[in-house]
Image: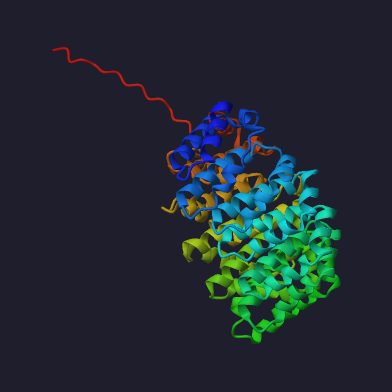
């Protein structure tokens, strides 16, 4: 097969119209398994294939891209860097997006390799071309360029190549072209900053981060909203949060929440401000965040009680995030009557809102009620039980009715609420004391879709694995649950039929 492929490559190099031969070559390389293709094509001269990319014939280009993509992926990154760097560099400047993507994909492989990355870091012109790809119209090409540069920046050599040369100015020049490219560069910078304190230092010293932070208070509301999303990404790392705190950005965003009350256009960026603090509370201390920035939790409550479905949805998501750990639950509990009123509001939304809001509400309720076994103190169990009872006089029936409605997405979200209380003794007592409830959760025919069957299985799995279930349910019902668990979510009882011939 190697000789056949080599023969086709030699033949192709001298043809003016090589389409048929390229099709044959594509068939040949696709027929060889990847684990043996490397041995087959090693040592082959691929320059003829690269040269055939210099055409306006779209079919010829796509065939060459398919063949090269298959062959190059089995070659070692160091081999690529040493033998095809110039060809790949030309590919970055090719008018075809598929050729650009091919080149960027291989360059990303090289920068991910501990030895090949040095070759690319030292190749100024290649990096210059990759940077230019951030500014192309095709989003997928720009994203590949961002991925490659982000990987490169995970090394000291890569950081120096990007930030200690005139490439910094190239990036800044690209940002002036339009808002889209500017925010692609911000995406790159935030991604690099998130890797380590060192990489954040490079980005800060090059003034990219201060420019991004300046966008938070700009006159363009849409730009402001996008900036908040970018800055929120920095909260995912400890050094990112430290930087934001040192620069006074967390205080600034808190003040923006307060100031939003007098801004008629705040609806465009306020959800982003709330999400910022929601993310911060997840990775930091919910109590500390809510105590230091009371405007945040106040605004979440206001948004949840309001009539704007966009604001309400963000508030529900944030409440779920806050209440997903014990500290967050206690923060919410301390608000007293405000939170009790909010639980009643959530009950109304779970029943009467749009399907999307109902789903988000149910997901938040499930997170609020979830309490891992190792955290189930008497006080916390009493708290989650009181929350559950706040939803209705018959909360179990409320969520069961929702789970039976003809909307698959509602089924699973409502069933998650049952999973949340299934590990807690009070929830188990409520289940066994509700006539027909155990029959409902072990009835595989009630909801035919796979997702609902999986969700019911998770309820039973949680019950069986709880230490208190056997004592509360009794041996007979507990054995029933164990049998269901052993059979699995998709078990169908076999029904035998016997044909009886008429005696006549």
Quadrant including the C terminus: top left
| Residue at x 59% of width, y 83% of height | 265
387 to the left or right of 380: left
Check the image and name the residue furthest to the front.
Answer: 14
Whether residue 470 appears in this view of the structure is yes
Please name the residue shown 76% across and 58% down the image: 124
462 to 87, vertically: above or below: above
Measured as percent of width and height from the top left, residue 426 is found at: 65, 48
Residue occupying the far left of the picture: 504
Q: How many marks?
A: 0
Residue 390, position in %: x, y? 60, 62
At 47% from the left edge and 52% from the top edge, which residue is drawn? 58
Picture quadrant where residue 115 is located: top right
> Is 299 or 335 nearer to us in this picture?
299
Q: Where does residue 223 sit, x and y in percent of width and height?
A: 64, 76
Q: Is residue 176 above or below residue 453?
A: below
Q: Residue furthest top?
A: 503
Q: Position of residue 330 (x, y in %)?
A: 75, 61
Q: Is residue 459 visible?
A: no
Instruction: Give the left or right position of residue 163, taking residue 262 as reference.
Output: right
Q: Which residue is located at x 54 percent, y 47 percent?
A: 52
61 and 222: which is toward the camera: 61
Q: Nearer the viewer, residue 378 or 90?
A: 90
Residue extending farthest bottom: 262
Nearer to us in this view, 417 or 319: 319
Whether 172 is drawn above or below 157: the answer is: below
């Amino acid at each position: 097969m190697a000789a056949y492929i080599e023969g086709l490559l030699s033949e192709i190099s001298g043809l003016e119209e090589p389409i048929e031969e390229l099709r044959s070559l594509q068939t040949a390389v696709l027929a060889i398994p990847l684990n043996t293709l490397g041995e087959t094509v090693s040592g082959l001269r691929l320059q003829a294939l690269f040269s055939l990319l210099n055409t306006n014939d779209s079919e010829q280009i796509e065939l060459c891209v398919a063949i090269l993509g298959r062959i190059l992926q089995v070659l070692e990154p160091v081999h690529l860097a040493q033998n095809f760097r110039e060809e790949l560099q030309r590919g970055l400047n090719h008018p075809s997006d598929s050729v650009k993507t091919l080149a960027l994909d291989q360059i990303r492989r090289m920068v991910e390799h501990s030895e090949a990355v040095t070759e690319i870091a030292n190749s100024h012109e290649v990096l210059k071309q990759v940077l230019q790809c951030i500014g192309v119209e095709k989003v997928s090409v720009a994203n590949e360029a961002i991925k490659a540069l982000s990987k490169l920046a995970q090394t000291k050599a890569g950081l120096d190549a990007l930030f200690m040369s005139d490439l910094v100015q190239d990036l800044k020049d690209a940002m002036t072209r339009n808002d889209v490219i500017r925010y692609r560069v911000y995406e790159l910078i935030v991604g690099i900053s998130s890797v380590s304190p060192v990489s954040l230092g490079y980005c800060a010293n090059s003034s990219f981060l201060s420019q991004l932070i300046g966008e938070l208070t700009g006159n363009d509301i849409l730009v402001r909203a996008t900036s908040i999303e970018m800055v929120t990404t920095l909260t995912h790392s400890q050094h990112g949060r430290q930087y934001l705190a040192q620069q006074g950005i967390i205080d600034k965003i808190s003040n923006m929440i307060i100031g939003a009350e007098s801004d008629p256009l705040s609806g465009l960026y306020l959800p982003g401000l709330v999400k910022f603090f929601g993310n911060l509370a997840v990775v930091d201390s919910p109590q500390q965040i809510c105590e230091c920035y009371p405007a945040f939790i106040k605004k979440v409550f206001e948004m949840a009680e309001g009539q704007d479905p966009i604001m309400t949805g963000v508030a529900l998501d944030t409440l779920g995030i806050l209440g997903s750990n014990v500290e967050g639950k206690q923060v919410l509990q301390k608000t007293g009557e405000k939170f009790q009123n909010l639980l009643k509001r959530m009950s109304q939304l779970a029943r009467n809102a749009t399907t999307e809001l109902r789903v988000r509400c149910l997901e938040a309720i499930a997170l609020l009620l979830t309490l891992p076994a190792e955290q189930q103190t008497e006080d916390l169990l009493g708290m989650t039980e009181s929350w559950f009872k706040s939803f209705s006089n018959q909360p179990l029936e409320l969520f069961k009715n929702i789970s039976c409605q003809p909307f698959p997405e509602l089924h699973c979200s409502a069933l998650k609420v049952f999973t949340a209380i299934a590990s807690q003794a009070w929830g188990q007592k409520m289940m066994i004391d509700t006539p027909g409830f155990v029959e409902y959760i072990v009835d595989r025919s009630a909801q035919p879709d796979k997702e609902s069957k999986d969700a019911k299985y998770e309820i039973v799995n949680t019950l069986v694995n709880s230490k208190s279930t056997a004592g509360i349910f009794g041996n007979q019902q507990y054995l029933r649950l164990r049998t269901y668990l052993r059979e699995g979510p998709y078990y169908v009882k076999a029904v035998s039929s016997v044909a009886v011939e008429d005696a006549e």
